[in-house]
Amino acid sequence: MTQPAEVALAMDWGGTWSRIAVADGQGEILWQSRRLNDPASDRERLIGDSEDLIRQAVEWCGERAIAGLGIAVGGPVDAPTGALMEPNLPALNGVSLPALWAPLLGRPVYVGNDANLAALGEFRYGAGLAARRQGNAPRTLVYVTVSTGIGGGVIEQERMFLGAHGQAVEVGHMVIDRSSAAPRCRCGRGGCLESLASGTAIARIARLRAAEPGAGDSPLAGPEPAQITSERVFEAAGQGDPLALDIVNGAVQALAVGFTNILHLYNPDLLALGGGVTSGLISLGLLPQINALMLESAMTEGHRDIRLEPSRLGDAAGMLGAASLVWDGAGRGGG
Ligand SMILES: [Zn+2]
């Protein structure tokens, strides 16, 4: 009888959901579960709820050997201690999950920032793997998620680029528009990429524009502007509504500027795009336009040697990146 293959436990501890998976060494998710976080919960409750998820996963594993647990979290992570810094669940600030759970599990525990780990997941098991299979192994991969917010990560020589304090690659807070008319960003500044092209920004811009007299007979100019979401804007754009198309075009232009900056900063050969807004852009067939605009402004041939690809792993990218930390087994998960 052969022993069942060793598995990794992987968590994605987001602001809304806590998700857990059991993954094998090939990046296949064998089992997964999730529960809603109550942001009003205190620290003990949040940790207790996640320990329940871990217990379920361990039970599912049965006879399978568990190599360790990798955890993706929103916000930066202190590299030496694995402590969470300013996480999206404020009650967890300062908590070191490796210190808490490694003794409980009897296996190594790694923690990293969710966007950086999504980049690692895409490199190993997603867009990076697809490129390797086509004979185009990427040297430098940049992953950008364009969703309610905009975040990203860089994989250089198979390793996450973290920065001195684990806070590198805040692509959403690249300033694109310095004019006085630029929208405010949640970071407190104005004109960041996130304030121009995220799902939140697209919905906010649409609500403002739909209330203007010029909105005319746009389907966005209904009686309830508060109901407008970015999905609704993409839907209206797909039906050819000029207002929605103009709003989407604003996001396209901002993203193209941001991506050209990324080419010049990191010189990637693969730029993988994830998130709900990316799905909307793909549904409208806009990735080639973004690609063309980005290349138009690139400085040299070396910067233009880049492929823009949709992410392959969807919302499992962060968990599979966390599983990669376990397989690496060397504590690369600083931030
Ligand atoms: Zn910002």
Image (cartoon, rainbow, N blue to C red):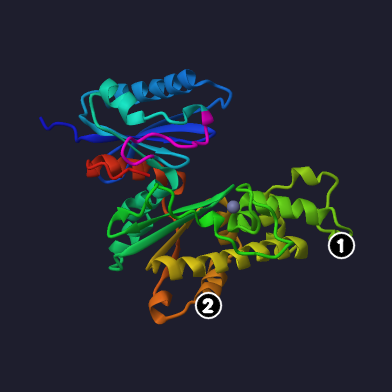
The residue that disc 2 covers is: 297
Image position of 22 (left or right of 87) = left
Res 217 visible? yes
Measured along the vertical axis of the image, is residue 89 above or below residue 175? above
**Nearest to the observer: residue 27 or residue 106:** 106
Residue on which the image places disc 1: 214
Q: Amino acid at mark 1?
A: Gly
Residue 159's tag is none
Region of the chain picked out in magenta, as a range: 78-90
Is residue 81 covered in magenta?
Answer: yes
Q: What secondary structure is found at the residue carrying circle 2?
A: loop
Closer to the camera: disc 1 or disc 2?
2
State the residue at coordinates (43%, 19%): 48
Q: Position of residue 155 (x, y in %)?
A: 34, 57
Q: Does residue 275 sit above or below 178 in this rendering?
A: above
Distance (Cα) linking label 1 and label 2: 33 Å
Which residue type carries mark 2? Ser
Q: Residue 159 location, x and y as percent?
A: 29, 54
Task: Note whether 333 is above or below 181 in the view shown.
Answer: above
